[in-house]
């Protein structure tokens, strides 16, 4: 590993307000990691009694105390000033989860003046905020309000064309409307509302920071126009405010939108941080953005890549050449670009039913992540060896993205017929993960068929030199070197009733850059690679962290959060631009700096952690693994089948689920019309209902999170992914390959895509 940063070298700080932690990452001028700090909300601030950083109430309400964020920032700044030379920090960037902060009228229009002798939380008490506990992205109480806004604008297509997005539960406009209708006292005492990222930037700059245009486009009340001509939609604001007079108030609450593109200084650090912690007065504050966009930036993807982020919500993001909004996906201006650049955009697909169904299936059928991974691995594609009797499941515990926004429940299908439970219970983990990834695979194809990604899409566009070199170096099982597309090998889409050819991979991403706990599971990584016929790469920071805590989205102690790292990269980029040393776009500059670091270090991989536990095996520190991947890994082998049978017998059932547990599971999941509420009660009957949102570790889950749904068992620890041979170009930027594509497996999945789409259509039309 490289030594410590040179004395006196400039440092750059990235902050990340996630659901469960407030994180800080510090890098030097060469983007080498030099510092990591974190404040865990549940443990460091236990007085707030959050679980996974949030409060839950019966139903779909998920909120978090804003005061906890302020106090966490106090703790984090203390740690940073104690452990690092803050006078060397030249620029600060950051990101935050999607949430709104409601300020009372008293500090408006001026940001509250702060006394450097006192901590922040003693001066910004809960009484400073008109809504002390604010909804987070998982909250769905505003869904009906979002639908009413959508109806007012003429439906999902008209709404998307106008304000860039259609109805969803996290819509900021819907949250504002809900507060007006349900909490008039909160409405009356409000003086300003801020997106959480702008709120964090305001706290460290001591002045009001405007929301960036990328996040404004996700609010449901902003009309984007190139050249900085975008504006808040007066009609939408008047609708959510209830009158023209109140609309003027709301317009004042929102403030202006920063249309600079994120490529410049937005403020300098506050006098409070200078006097209390020793920051330099001219320290740059760069634009803060959403956590999922900052994670995307940290991976510096090529145009032909897709970024897949697993977590409480799953995201699939890719670059787009044009702003073409649609109800099929979301699209945002790139959050780090210079006004002189050609405009760039990011398209995104979202799934709300992510970690919660995965943890629920684990609790119901295996009680451990290692057993969950083993069942995903040994059960055949489609849950059955037969070609015509594939199994499908849809776990829609919350209303999800289009076209499933109004569908709720747990639905299983065998031989095309709805069933209450699969005959073989072991199929449930694999069918769940297949359904989640198939959804992204199908929605990607629908998105590309609209022309949203340009005339050439997927692996046919952008710079794929890294991809082709790595693929040529190590073709997967059954894959012929230099075979970029297989449309000619399969059946065209004619006659399948689809707007795309499921057998053609040329429009699919060239690489999947993946983050989040689920991709730490070898079986999940292989499945993603097979469905997209593309290699899967993960950041080496996550790969090393996964050797220590593979079950959690939060990084292990001493390991950086990806969104915090993205913020630090942006801070470095903006500083370089001001000094005149930056070259090219954000992605070009980050790749240049990491390439320069690689050369000067003599080819040593980037540092993955600071002061934390050193992993015993990972992609960054050990030779490549020997784990099977590809189609062969999904075929039942005798030894693995015996393991799976033994696992099921320990749970009280046999191979076809004819035991006591099977009967209990069938009564628990019930019919499709009742499973939504039953599934919720199953996961919340114990003492810790919300831990599923943070993908709890084995010890936490065995403490009784699922009540009597299944007995606690002791199993071997999950063996997380490790690296396959990875190209030098990918290693330079801190990526490691964990799964290779397999043409045979891709073709097998292509054959079941039409049936998946048919069943999905039946759910959408309420025919089952």
Image (cartoon, rainbow, N blue to C red):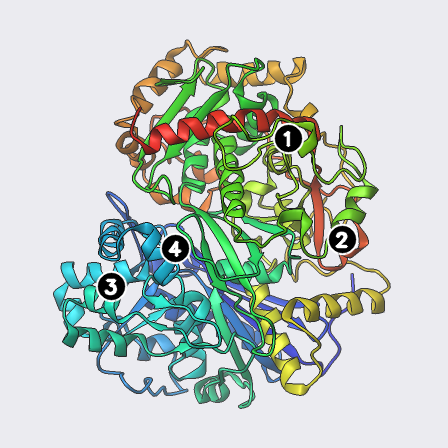
In which image quadrant can residue 82 be found?
bottom right
- Alpha carbon distance from label 2 to label 3: 45 Å
680 is higher (above) or lower (below) than 125: above
What is the secondary structure assignment of the residue under circle 3?
Answer: helix
**Which mark is in front, 2 or 3?**
2
Q: How many neighbours does mark 4 have within 10 angstroms: few (below 14), some (14-19), or many (20 or more)?
A: many
Q: Position of residue 87 (x, y in %)?
A: 60, 85
**For this rendering, which residue is in front, 419 or 703?**
419
Q: How many neighbours does mark 2 have within 10 angstroms: few (below 14), some (14-19), or many (20 or more)?
A: some
Question: Tag on residue 176?
Answer: 3
**For this rendering, which residue is in front, 297 or 128?**
297
The answer to which of marks 2 and 4 sits earlier in the sequence is 4
**For this rendering, which residue is in front, 80 or 164?**
164
Question: Tag on residue 466?
Answer: 2
- Which residue is denoted by mark 1 in the rendering? 746
Q: Position of residue 647 (x, y in %)?
A: 53, 19
**For this rendering, which residue is in front, 474 or 162?**
162
Question: Tag on residue 53?
Answer: 4
- Alpha carbon distance from label 3 to label 1: 44 Å
Q: Quadrant of the N terminus?
A: bottom right
- Alpha carbon distance from label 2 to label 4: 39 Å
Q: Residue furthest front?
A: 494
What is the secondary structure assignment of the residue under circle 1?
Answer: helix
In which image quadrant can residue 645 be found?
top right
Answer with left or right where residue 359 lies relative to residue 671.
right
Q: Residue at x 17, y 64 (%)?
A: 180
| Image mark count | 4
């Amino acid at each position: 590993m490289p030594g410590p940063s040179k004395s006196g070298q400039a440092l750059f700080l990235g902050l990340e307000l996630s659901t469960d932690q407030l994180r800080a990452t510090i890098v030097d001028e060469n983007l080498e990691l030099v510092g990591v700090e974190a404040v865990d909300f549940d443990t460091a601030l236990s007085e707030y009694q959050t679980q996974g950083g949030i409060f839950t109430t019966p139903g779909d309400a998920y909120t978090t105390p804003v005061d906890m964020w302020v106090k966490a920032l106090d703790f984090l700044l203390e740690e940073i000033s104690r452990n690092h030379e803050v006078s060397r920090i030249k620029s600060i960037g950051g990101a935050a989860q999607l949430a709104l902060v409601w300020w009372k009228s008293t500090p408006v229009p001026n940001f509250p003046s702060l006394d450097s002798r006192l901590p922040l939380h003693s001066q910004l008490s809960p009484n400073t905020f008109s809504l002390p506990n604010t909804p987070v992205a998982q909250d769905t109480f505003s869904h009906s309000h979002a639908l009413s806004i959508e109806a007012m604008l003429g439906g999902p297509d008209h709404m998307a064309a106008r304000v860039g997005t259609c109805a969803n539960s996290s819509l900021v406009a819907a949250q504002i409307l809900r507060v007006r209708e349900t909490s008039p006292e909160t409405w009356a005492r409000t003086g300003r509302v801020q997106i959480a990222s702008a709120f964090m930037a305001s706290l460290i700059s001591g002045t009001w920071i405007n929301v960036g245009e990328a996040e404004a486009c996700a609010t449901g009340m902003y009309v984007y126009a190139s050249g900085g001509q975008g504006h808040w939609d007066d009609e939408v604001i008047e609708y959510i405010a209830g009158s023209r007079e109140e609309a003027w108030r709301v317009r004042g609450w929102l403030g202006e939108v920063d249309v600079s593109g994120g490529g410049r200084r937005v403020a300098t650090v506050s006098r409070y941080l200078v006097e209390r912690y020793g920051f330099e007065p001219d320290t740059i504050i760069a634009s803060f953005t959403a956590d999922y966009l900052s994670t995307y930036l940290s991976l510096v993807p090529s145009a032909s890549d897709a970024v897949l982020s697993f977590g409480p919500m799953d995201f699939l993001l890719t670059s787009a050449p044009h702003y073409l909004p649609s109800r099929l996906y979301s699209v945002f201006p790139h959050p780090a670009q210079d006004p002189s650049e050609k405009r760039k955009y990011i398209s995104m697909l979202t799934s709300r039913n992510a970690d919660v169904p995965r943890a629920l299936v684990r609790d119901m059928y295996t009680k451990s992540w290692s057993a969950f991974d083993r069942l995903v691995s040994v059960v055949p594609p489609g849950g059955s060896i037969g070609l015509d009797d594939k199994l499908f499941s849809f776990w829609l515990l919350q209303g999800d993205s289009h076209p499933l926004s109004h569908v709720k429940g747990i639905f299983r299908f065998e031989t095309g017929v709805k069933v209450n439970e699969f005959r073989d219970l072991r199929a449930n983990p694999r069918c769940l993960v297949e359904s989640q990834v198939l959804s992204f695979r199908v929605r990607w194809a629908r998105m590309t068929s609209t022309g949203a990604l340009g005339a050439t899409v997927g692996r046919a566009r952008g710079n794929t030199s890294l991809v082709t070199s790595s693929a040529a170096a190590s073709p997967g099982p059954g894959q012929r070197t230099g075979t970029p597309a297989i449309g000619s090998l399969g059946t065209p889409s004619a006659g399948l009733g689809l707007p795309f050819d499921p057998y053609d991979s040329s429009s699919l991403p060239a690489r999947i850059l993946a983050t989040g706990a689920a991709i730490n599971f070898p079986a999940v990584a292989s499945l993603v690679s097979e469905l997209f016929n593309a290699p899967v790469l993960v950041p080496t920071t996550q790969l090393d962290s996964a050797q220590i805590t593979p079950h959690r989205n939060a990084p292990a102690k001493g390991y950086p959060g990806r969104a915090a790292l993205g913020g630090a990269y942006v801070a470095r980029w903006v500083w370089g631009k001001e000094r005149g040393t930056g070259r090219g776009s954000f992605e070009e500059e980050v790749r240049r700096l990491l390439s320069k670091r690689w050369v000067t270090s003599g080819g040593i991989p980037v540092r993955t952690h600071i002061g934390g536990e050193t992993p015993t095996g990972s992609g960054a520190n050990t030779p490549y693994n020997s784990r099977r991947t590809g189609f062969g890994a999904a075929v039942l082998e005798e030894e693995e089948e015996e393991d799976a049978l033994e696992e099921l017998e320990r749970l009280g059932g046999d191979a076809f689920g004819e035991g006591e547990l099977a009967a209990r599971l069938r009564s628990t999941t019930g019919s499709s019309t009742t499973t939504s509420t039953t599934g919720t009660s199953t996961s919340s009957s114990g003492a810790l209902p919300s831990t599923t949102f943070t993908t709890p570790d084995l010890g936490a889950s065995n403490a009784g999170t699922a009540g009597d749904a299944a007995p606690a068992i002791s199993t071997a620890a999950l063996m997380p992914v490790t690296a396959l041979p990875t190209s030098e170009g990918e290693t330079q930027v801190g990526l490691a390959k964990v799964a290779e594509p397999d043409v045979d497996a891709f073709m097998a999945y292509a054959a079941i895509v039409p049936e998946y789409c048919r069943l999905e259509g039946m759910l959408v039309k309420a025919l089952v």
